[in-house]
Image: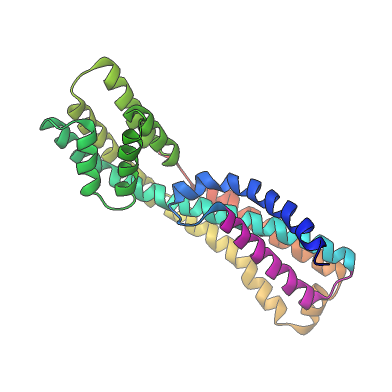
Amino acid sequence: MAALAPGFWQPLEARLALYAVRYAGNLEAAGLQISPRRLVATVTAAAGVLWAALLVALRPDPTIALLLMIACGEVGAFGGRVYLRRKREQRTAAFREQLEGALRTLSGAVRVGLGIRQALVLTSEQSREPAKTEFMRVVALSNLGMSVLDAFDQLALRMVTPETAVLARVIRVQSQTGGDLGSVLEGLAGTIRDRRRLRRRVSAITAQGRATAWLLGLLPLAVGLFVLSQADLRAAMLDTVVGRIFLAIALGLDALAVISLGKIARVDP
């Protein structure tokens, strides 16, 4: 058994390492101080714990246990992706809120005669996270030999927002055509301010639709709790195959309804 353990674990570890590469970009954009391999190991361990808990609770036969293992692995991978996407979206949203002030600081620094690198250093020193780290990363990449234009392109890839993409294009176009970079950055900051106002207005207008989506999504769960409080109905739902099938269908349709209503109420200005 000891001789078989390395032969089993090493190919699995190599496969996990290849899978971890997919998380590297999202980890960097999310600002998480964890290696991709450790994240994959954590997700795998969580899926294993879930599978063990289901085995203890359900005591299924080997075929069902194998299917549960696959399902737990998929749930763990999905949960890891959702967590990373959520953290990345939160960090991107925070950067977008700080971008207007950072551009005004950058514009002022350029207007007083500082170069773009010195202006970026000054802007990062006067900014909060995550803008501080992102602008310092642009400076660090330029110090390592990458052009400032390419460094801003890398910033646009990490912070995926229309404002950041426009910023990278503005910097590149201005470097090729010349002109007053300070005025251009000031105008871009004004545009970002107007977009933020519009986004807040749209959020206020669609608040009722989002509340309706949550209400309609939680209502079937409340009805389900009432059904579970009745012994006969609970037995018919949980102890029969037909009841479990209909329960799974109902949960799936409820989740689909919440997602659909959320997308209907969402408007991207």
Can you name the residue that lies furthest to the bottom here?
231
* Residue 230 can be seen in this image: yes
Quarter of the image containing the N terminus?
bottom right
Q: Residue 211's spot in the image, x, y percent?
A: 48, 59
Reply above or below: 146 against 236. Answer: above
Look at 33% across and 48% down and name the residue there: 133
Q: Is residue 231 left or right of residue 110?
A: right
Look at 32% across and 33% down and name the residue there: 142
Look at 53% across and 46% down and name the residue there: 24
As rendered, which of 189 and 173 lies closer to the eye?
173
As rendered, which of 44 and 66 lies closer to the eye?
44
Which quadrant of the view contains residue 5?
A: bottom right
**Type of secondary structure dominating the magenta stretch:** helix
Can you name the residue that lies furthest to the top here?
177
Residue extent of the magenta highlight = 37-61
Q: Residue 72's spot in the image, x, y percent?
A: 72, 62
Reply above or below: 185 against 210. Answer: above
Quarter of the image containing the C terminus?
top left
Q: How many marks?
A: 0
* Residue 249 can be seen in this image: no
Which quadrant of the view contains residue 166?
A: top left
Look at 80% across and 82% down and name the residue there: 232
